[in-house]
Amino acid sequence: MRICIPSRGPEPGDLVDERFGRAPYYLIFDSESGTKESYKNPAAEGMGGVGPRAAQFLLDKNVQVLVTARIGGNALGALKAGGITILLYEEPGKTVNDAITAYKGGGLKEQ
Amino acid sequence: MNITVASGKGGTGKSMVAANLAWSLSASDPVTLVDCDVEEPNLHLFFPDGHPVVSPVSVLVPDIDPDRCTLCGECARFCAFGALVAAKDRVLFFPEHCHSCGGCAVACPEGAIAEIARPIGTVTERTISPSLRLVTGTLNEGEVLAVKVIQKAKAAAGNAPWVIIDASPGTSCPVVETLTGSDFCILVTESTPFGLHDLAIAYDVTYQMGIQSGVVINRSDGKDEAAHRFCEEKKIPVLAVIPFERRIAEIQGSGNLISRRDPAWKERFCAIGRACRALWEGA
């Protein structure tokens, strides 16, 4: 399973960014291989249409699960049409590693 | 002569100046008044008479043929505005993000994208009197392409001895589009620090665009030294100072025009028009 967490920085120890489309980084974890990938969000500074563009980026990276605090309607529609499961992780001040732990523990609510 | 009435700050009295100027000048010359504040047009409130003739404003948007589409994603990669997303089994289109550039249709290697019209607003024309026409651009709620509606409204206005154009507040794309092609710009400000601050920004836009301007100080409390100083420094003529009076507010607030109620004000607004023309012809 490929899981994406929007992040404020490029490392797993960095804080989760509560915004989906405008998060500066996306960290992608592959639960089968155990690998971690870090990408700068190409849509973060965009003038508009940030949500759909960020959604396209995740679809291109074959993400299967997004763990995020908040998500807008357009991005939600695009991600769902792409078959991505969206799980809500709304705790403030947590790191990407915390979010992964929460995902593994199960119980995150599906949006 | 095309005169755009603009201001940096909202609520300084652009519409009040535009409506009174158009009404006053129409006593002796044909005038077309154009409401280019398309997100919140309001000039028609001052002119309840006149049968409205409404034309739709449409833009071209992509229409994807699912039989030809291979979901390659070239269209979505091309779109700078996030209006297209290539999902697993279809391409999603977010019409409100589309800027109608047509690039996706060019980028599609399969020729699967046609362009179809999508309405985003209207242009309404009214004949108020034999010498006064009102053209109103209206952008539909939730739409972003104000510029397209402004272009259509200006095209519908055509030429007249006087074309008076009411701009939206601010200095962004819609204002620049409204100002494009104008001979002169009346900048309306007020006796507040905000009014002056935004006047400076609006003036800068007219200066960059090479459009001559003059200032009307509206709702003046008599303490306009800072505005006068600014105009002196920049060599912008002050065309008129309109006092902050309850009577003016009451007349305008009830949907009437101070120049329609009071011949002295009508003459004052005609003088503003003549001053603009003299400055333009002198330039």
Image (tube, coloured by chain):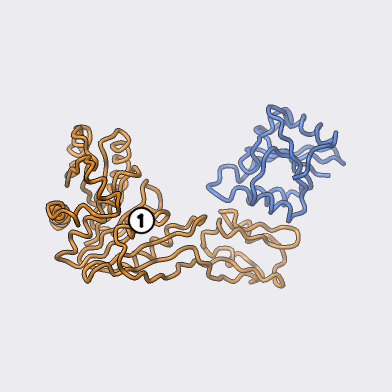
Q: Chain of mark 1?
A: B
- Residues B36 and B50: in front is B50
Quadrant into which the C terminus of chain B falls: bottom left
- Compared with B24, A94 (above or below) is above
Residue depicted at x 62% and y 38%: A24
Apparent colour of chain A = blue
Residue marked by disc 1: B42
Q: Is residue B279 visible?
A: no
User: Residue A59 appears at what percent x and percent y?
Assistant: 72, 51
Left or right of A110 in this view: B131: left
- Residue type of the residue flagged with mark 1: Asn
Residue B216 in which image quadrant: top left
Residue depicted at x 22% and y 42%: B217
User: Residue B252 appears at what percent x and percent y?
Assistant: 27, 50
Left or right of A3 in this view: A51: left
Neighbor class of circle 1 (other Cα within 10 Å; few <14, some 14-19, many 20+) is: some
- In the image, the chain rendered in orange is B
- Compared with B62, B257 (above or below) is above
Element carrying mark 1: loop
Residue A32 in which image quadrant: top right
Q: Is residue A65 visible?
A: yes
Residue B223 in which image quadrant: top left
Residue depicted at x 76% and y 47%: A63
User: Residue B219 appears at what percent x and percent y?
Assistant: 24, 41
